[in-house]
Image (spheres, grey):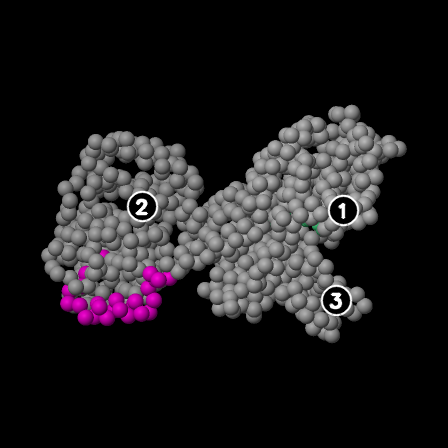
Amino acid sequence: MSKTIIISNRLPLQLKIRDNTIETTPSVGGLATGMKSVHSENDSIWIGWSGLTEEEFNLDLKEQVTAALKKHQCVGVPLTENDIDGFYYGFSNNTLWPLFHYFMEYTEFEKDTWETYKSVNQKFADVVIQNLEEGDTVWIHDYQLLLLSKYIRRKRPDVSIGFFLHIPFPSYEVFRTIPCREELLKGMLGADLLGFHTYDYERHFLSAVQRILGYEINFNTIHLDNRIVKVDSFPMGIDYNKFHNAAKTHNQKAKKDKTEIQQEIDKHLKKGSNQAKLILSIDRLDYTKGIANRLRAFEYFLDKYPEFKGKARLVMLAVPSRANVPQYQRLKNEIDQLVGRINGKFAEVSWTPIWYFYRSLPFENLIDLYTSSEVALLTPIRDGMNLVAKEYIASKVDKKGVLILSEMTGASNEMSEALIINPNNFEEIADTLKFALEMPEEEQIKRNSALQKRLQRYNVEKWANDFFDALETTKNDTKKYTLKKINTAIKDEIVSKFNASKNKILFLDYDGTMVPFEKLPENAKPTQRVFDTLDALHSQPNTKVIIITGRDRDTIQKWFGHKEYTLITEHGAWLKESNKDWELMERVDNKWFKSIAPILESFTDRTPGSFVEEKRYSLAWHFRNVDPDLGKKRANSLKTTIQQLIANHNLEILEGDKVLEIKVSGVSKGKSASKMLLDKTYDFIFAIGDDWTDEHMFKELPNHAYTVKVGLKNTVAQYYVEDINKVYDLLTALK
Ligand code: GDG
């Protein structure tokens, strides 16, 4: 039976060796917490690092480790100390983590750690491949494994792979600074589906792919040579019932059953109207979480609103994280000092402003803190999602409590009923804290009811199901392409039909079909391969070879005039039969140039990289070398401007691949191709092309024609080939 393989850097459990035996404890962290329910409810295995390096246990314990992991449906990836240093502490946490969270000043790029990152991703791929069976679905998580999809696909091209990024994907301007940017993007594009928490991260990724790799993007689909990749946003939810029910049980506990922490909190709460309200903050100790800012803002709040001294207390849980990385050690010192200073500055005999815990607490204590706090103050500088915000709201059984949340978190996009703040604006945080502490209960209930409803509906299970459904859809879309792809059987059929036919005609597009696109059109000259292939076809008996192109007559004359192939240029305006002169296929004129050309020129002046191509009977505005977003925007506004002008004229706009062409209406590759069929009965008709303008030809040719699209784009053609090399494979087989 097919299974799901979940892969993340760390397994959802940690191993410890005590007295030569293995102990397992659950891991803390957003990913582990969120995916745990998916893992336990499905037929799946989880592949990741166990937390113990190869040096940490001897061969005798190896079997015990494997068995302990197996009990939890987990498989370990063996990593050495050196691997962890370079891959985890090095490239993942010294390069990718700060860069993706916009901390460019902390971002280091070192070749050694990059090499280790690659080799560890390969080690993950090896373990995945060992465990992969026919029909399995692979779901890869997070920034430590950006290259894994590509490495798996190299060995298993047909496997269905999903990838989810749990942290932000930064803007192109930030991402472009990393030297290995292309490899990272290509690594990610090994997946069939890429998921992000928010639409902003998704569009940042798409823009990086478009600008750095130059790939074509159609809404949220990226067209690679032989595959399509879908990109979408899936805001991660939590296991709502787990938190809500735990909070319910917690609230009903008798005093003796309560945790020690809760009993301490209760003592403090008993002080009646003088009690200090609890303001909760929980995060891993990480510079992205804005903990130092939060402390300073809290200090500012107590200075600005001294009436809250003795009436409010910050309960701050900072969970130790990546303590080997120098930035984290410095941050720990900074926070220790800040807490000490603020407590020293404001403390009274009966009140200290901050309760600070630097450790990880068991789940039940987390619930103690969520349920007992009147306010949660979460102020990350950047945070992919932030699950604590969601867990806090889910734990409010009586719907009382106020969430203050940074606008820099992914969660703020969905939690608009929370009080949303800018974490760098102390004034705003101080005022919002006051507002929160004084918020009437009815308003708290109203806000939290809406929040809870949404969290309950879009929980972690729904998130995972949505992701899997989208992966399935992507797989089916890819299958549709696979069915149309020219394989050996289809190729053999075309070849035998060609051999058996008496009269053969072939329509061949030029740019993007016979030669790749160049930055400047004049550079895409025909190569020897073009001539050899066309000559071989042309020398077959009763075979008419036609180059059919949007290019201007003069260029095609220069390049192919000495050959005997039939030439159709400017989308069907001109025809040259072998050994004859050029003739007009349509009644066309170019008197209209003088009114349209100046408009195109003014757009060219304002759009760096664009240029105008003047053909005999058409004008083309090319924007293939323009910044992609600007190009699209300008092309749209040019189209609108021209459309108004040509409304009452016999002109039309043709939208090609990064080109707008204005020409006399009624001229098209389809029309001219059909005309070529009138003089004879052809029993073999073949057309191949990559562009939108070739679709006219595919549409108008008779049903028995073989029509072939180059590249994975939507098409009415019967078949497709992935790239130019495959075009030649097919054409050279026709002999
Ligand atoms: C990454 C992204 C994204 C925390 N302390 C304790 C404890 N926790 C649990 C919380 C929560 C999780 O850890 C923290 O999740 P976050 O989402 O807040 O943050 P990251 O760990 O940075 O997670 C983040 C997430 O991935 C998911 O995609 O939201 O943006 O950075 O679940 O409950 N759990 C226990 N004791 C603790 O002391 N038991």
- Write the start and end of the magenta stretch as one range: 482-507
Answer with left or right where residue 387 lies relative to residue 575: right
Q: Residue 681 lies in what quarter of the image?
A: bottom left
Residue 407 sits above or below residue 516 on the image: above
Q: Amino acid at mark 2?
A: Gly
Q: Which mark is residue 529?
A: none
Q: Nearer the viewer, mark 1 or mark 3?
A: 1
Q: Amino acid at mark 1?
A: Lys
SS at mark 2 in the image: strand
Answer with left or right where residue 173 lies relative to residue 252: left
Query: What residue is shown with label 2?
Result: 656
What residue is rendered at 31% in x and 51% in y?
691
Q: Position of residue 53 (x, y in %)?
A: 71, 64
Query: What residue is shown with label 1?
Result: 253
* Cβ atoms at labels 2 and 3 below 8 Å apart: no
Q: Is residue 506 magenta?
A: yes
Q: For the residues marked 2 and 3, what is the alpha-carbon distance in whole angstroms?
A: 64 Å
Query: What residue is shown with label 3?
Result: 22
**Residue extending furthest left?**
679
Q: How many marks?
A: 3
Q: For the residues marked 1 and 3, what is the alpha-carbon distance in whole angstroms?
A: 34 Å
Q: Position of residue 604 (x, y in %)?
A: 36, 36
Q: Residues within 10 Å of mark 3 (few under 14, many from 20)?
A: some
Q: Residues within 10 Å of mark 1 (few under 14, many from 20)?
A: few
What residue is rendered at 28% in x and 56% in y?
717
**Residue extending furthest bottom?**
60
What residue is rendered at 20% in x and 55% in y?
701
SS at mark 3 in the image: strand
Q: Position of residue 134 (x, y in %)?
A: 49, 68
Residue closest to the eye, 714 or 386: 386
